[in-house]
Amino acid sequence: MEKQNKIVIYQVFIRLYGNTHAINKKWGTIQENGVGRFTDINNKALKAIRELGVTRIWYTGVLHHAMVTDYSAYGLPGDDPDVVKGRAGSPYAIKDYFNVNPDLAVDPARRLEEFGELVERTHRNGMQVIIDIVPNHVARSYHSVTNPPGVEDLGASDDRSVEYRRENNFYYIPGEPFRVPQWRDGYLPLGGEPHPLADGHFDENPAKWTGNGSRSPQPDMNDWYETAKLNFGVRPDGTKDFDTLPAGFENEPAEAHFAFWEDRDVPDTWKKFRDIALYWLDRGIDGFRYDMAQMVPVEFWSYLNSAIKVKQPEALLVSEIYIPEMFRDYIRLGKMDCLYDKVDLYDTLKRIMAGEAGTDRIVGIRESMADINGHMLHFMENHDEQRIASTGFAGDARKAKPAMVVSAAIGTGPVMVYFGQEVGEPAAEDAGFGSATRTTIFDYWGVPHHVRWMNNGRFDGGQLTAEEKALREFYRRLLNFTAGSAVLTGEYREIHSYNRQHTGWYNDRVFSFVRWKGDERLIIVANFDASDGFGFELQLPGDLTGQWGLTDGSHTLADRLGDRRLTLEVRNGKAETRIDLQPLESLILELK
């Protein structure tokens, strides 16, 4: 299927997004530090997001997860702080897959309806909705209060006397109760604040395996101790207790995968997650971001994603995965639409920005992904990574501008931005659990730069500095061009290597490549150096000049990120243009 335009994803952490409180007390309560709600993302907010160039919103933290805040009045008591990270809790310790976080609702009794209204608003504003599914693990306190008829809780029918049974949803440590981790380095739940449940004890007997795979009844404090690992039919020795896909099935469409699994007996956990995904599709969700997908067997993804694609072919399925050797299996066998390009492109761009590597490294990364580049999701921030402007990363949000141009334009796959990135949020404060440089996902908090963008609900950037406004305008231009330009779904060729060999003053702080489709042609060049500008005669290889059908003479190049116009001179089949780049400047030059 030919892509018409690229996808632009905007990640919104709802608990933080609409929160206008600026007190930001460490370990603060919801009353002290405030919280963002579904209703805060109103039509005005959504219009501003859409005008940024966004086509899909990934709403993070939607599902009901473990949290300390008490909603007993609604039948939702708070969780034990000994097995909750932060006060607000991790959005990846899901407590109820069939309902949403009560923190996010004006009326917690109507929380599911309020989220449904947000989904409808998002659709009316021309964007689709993605939410998380976290198949590898759930909160230790998992219990759904709104299971659909005929659906029982994860673990409800487990045989807890054995470590493993295929139809169990969890792995167990028979004869051993769970023990709370030993805290170190001054850490205490809630920062040591007294709480009736913060007593160093959590009742779980027998203990379950921990989410990251720890088989100790007392996980380490650096383990995912707040979660229990789910059983997808993989025995403790790593062997598979289910049918595998036939040879050659990587070439079969989703319909064939669906038919393969239709009459086969599969582990109970598989069925439960299929029910979860289909439940949310029926509620208007347009796709899923799968947390730590690499920790779940690819056969399960074939089973789940083929069922999703048969029901909703246009659903977008995004996989968090960090093992490049697994990429192709998860795309072709697991039927994923796109995978995180973190360990290759993101990590390399981060090193280039820090001056620890040169741009030559980008060439090999793009070549190694040539057959799957349309499936690679590019980003420079998300909730797991350090903020670009933080002291742990670049210390200056502007340093990501060339990296964002490369991320957005080098492939045909989606590009993603995390809320606050476009206004230079540095995550400078320690919110409680965790540390500064990453915006907290565990505590109640306001995001200062984003709060200024919200401008008391006007969503117009009225409180931003001139520098922050200029940064957001850069993102607006880049993302709108990315989403609206069909040429970025076409052909790619790097011209960096050619210019490294043949062009004076061209160097490994600069990167250049071309894109084309039909009659459209782009020349893209980015300067990663924060201190130095560079000038040179950028050349196109002779065979490319012929392939593009360029005739001798002067051809106009218009910059799509700014207002500059340059000239491409073609003489005797040799094409070159004078490029003068300021520090951190990029040009997306459209051949007129």
Image: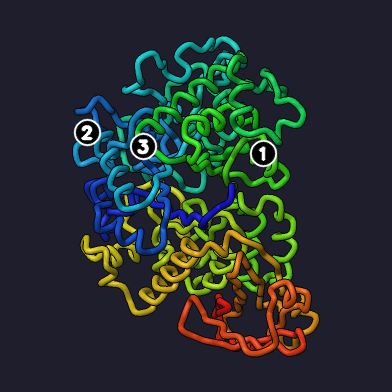
- Please name the residue shown 56% across and 78% down the image: 589
Residue type marked 3: Gly
Question: Mark 2 or 3, which is nearer the eye?
Answer: 3
Label 2 – label 3 distance at C-alpha: 17 Å
Residue 412 visible within the image: yes
Circle 3 sits in a helix, a strand or a loop, which is it? loop
Foreground residue among 149 and 584: 149
Q: Which residue is mark 2?
A: 110
Question: Mark 2 or 1, which is nearer the eye?
Answer: 1
Circle 1 sits in a helix, a strand or a loop, which is it? helix
- Please name the residue shown 25% across and 25% down the image: 75
Q: Say whether residue 454 is left or right of residue 512.
A: left
Circle 2 sits in a helix, a strand or a loop, which is it? helix
Foreground residue among 169 and 31: 169
Query: Where is residue 376 drawn, in percent x and y?
Result: 61, 52
Foreground residue among 548 and 204: 548
Q: Quadrant of the C terminus?
A: bottom right
Label 2 – label 1 distance at C-alpha: 40 Å
Residue type marked 1: Arg
Q: How many numbered tags mark residues here?
A: 3
Q: Which residue is mark 3?
A: 284
Q: Residues within 10 Å of mark 1 (few under 14, many from 20)?
A: some
The mark that comes first in sequence, 2 or 1, is: 2
The mark that comes first in sequence, 1 or 3, is: 3
Query: Where is residue 285 drawn, in percent x and y?
Result: 39, 38
| Depicted 30 relative to depicted 580: above or below | above
Q: Which residue is mark 1?
A: 332
- Please name the residue shown 39% across and 62% down the image: 420
Specify the quadrant of the image occupied by residue 45: bottom left
Residue type marked 2: Arg
Foreground residue among 590 and 436: 590
